[in-house]
Amino acid sequence: MLLRSLLLGTALWFGAAVSGASAAECAGPLKTTDAMIASDTAGIDLFVRRKQADCGKPDPSRVLLYVHGATYPSETAFDLQLDGQSWMDFIAKQGWDVWLVDLRGYGRSTRPPEMERPGTENAPIVTTDVAVRDVGSAVAHVRRVTGADRITLLGWSWGTSIMGGYAARHPEHVSKLVLYAPVWLRTTPSPLAGTGPLPAYRLVARDSAKQRWLNGVPEDKKAGLIPAGWFEAWADATWATDPKSAEAGMLRAPNGVLADLRAYWLDNKPWYDPAKIQAPTLITVAEWDQDTPPYMAQAVFDRLTAAPSKRLVLIGEGTHTIIMEKNRMQLWREVQNFLDE
């Protein structure tokens, strides 16, 4: 019934909240700073990127950290220049101090030693517990550099479990929370879980990525959903982050997330408790999302009983990867309204 009431190309709001206009864009070029920071494990460093606009005196209440999902790193989605602008750019131009982090095993961060061996030699690595620890290291770094007591957290897909879990455990460090395409208990088959023993990591083929991206999209909508050249730009950037992809043509992705999917989400056991989240929370999901269908977003929304305010936004004509589709500006603007209120 929820989807039938959707006017395609628009969004629906659930919950009491006032939508405000975004702040005026800051003038001048953006400043980008890349760094490697220590994790809580010897020999494992994490890649972080910071973007700032020249907006006068920094505002410690406008600091945001983003983390990626189960398969691909943060930089090639959140800071990919498509049509001249990334989502990270967009938020920074509104006067926000914007950060991203790659978890260990992803992007430019250190790959655990298990990833240098055949995957079958080790159990799945980089579980959600480990990912939350990595986010904790990034949060501590961001707070130290910016002087912010609390920061806003933004997670996509598996990243919503990571950020939601961190926010539930450390409410004193979180000012706002954005859950884009949240994971919850499934009532439909998972496109990722599979069966059989899980190796330490999996190999992802570039061709399969687009097929998964368009899963669930009506046939007559597929051709126009992703603007020309955008998939290729994303795939080129993403596969280039794995130094071994040039050899095998495959991207390595840790399997800890899949082990948790089987042990928790597919076994009817939530990994974290949204009722412990004490920050204002925005949940957003797209109509054709097959990885995290809209019923999951509704389930998380209903359990945010301690959040001082909450909002659920459902966007038409989009998938799990609406961040890089023709309707991406709807996602960006809804999130920005929430951030700027």
Image (spheres, helix red, strand yellow):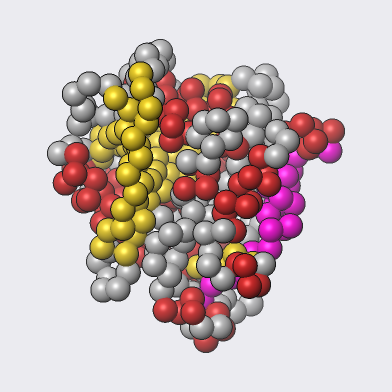
The residue that appears at 15% across and 39% down in the rendered structure is 147
Q: Quadrant of residue 41?
A: bottom left
Q: Give the x, y percent position of residue 8.
A: 69, 22
Q: Give the x, y percent position of residue 224.
A: 77, 31
Q: Is residue 210 magenta?
A: yes
Q: Give the x, y percent position of residue 199.
A: 55, 78
Establish if 48 lies above or below 123: above
The extreme right residue here reads 220
Residue nearest the viewer, comparing 189 with 80: 80
- Position of 263 with respect to 40 (left or right) is right
Which region shows up in magenta?
A: 200-219
Q: Quadrant of the N terminus?
A: top right
- Position of 287 with respect to 42 (left or right) is right
Q: Quadrant of the C terminus?
A: top left
Does residue 31 appear anywhere in the picture?
A: yes
The residue that appears at 63% across and 72% down in the rendered structure is 247
Q: Give the x, y percent position of residue 118.
A: 56, 83
The residue that appears at 68% across and 63% down in the rendered structure is 205
Establish if 113 lies above or below 263: below
Residue nearest the viewer, comparing 40 with 192: 40
Does residue 275 appear anywhere in the picture?
A: no
The residue that appears at 45% across and 28% down in the rendered structure is 90
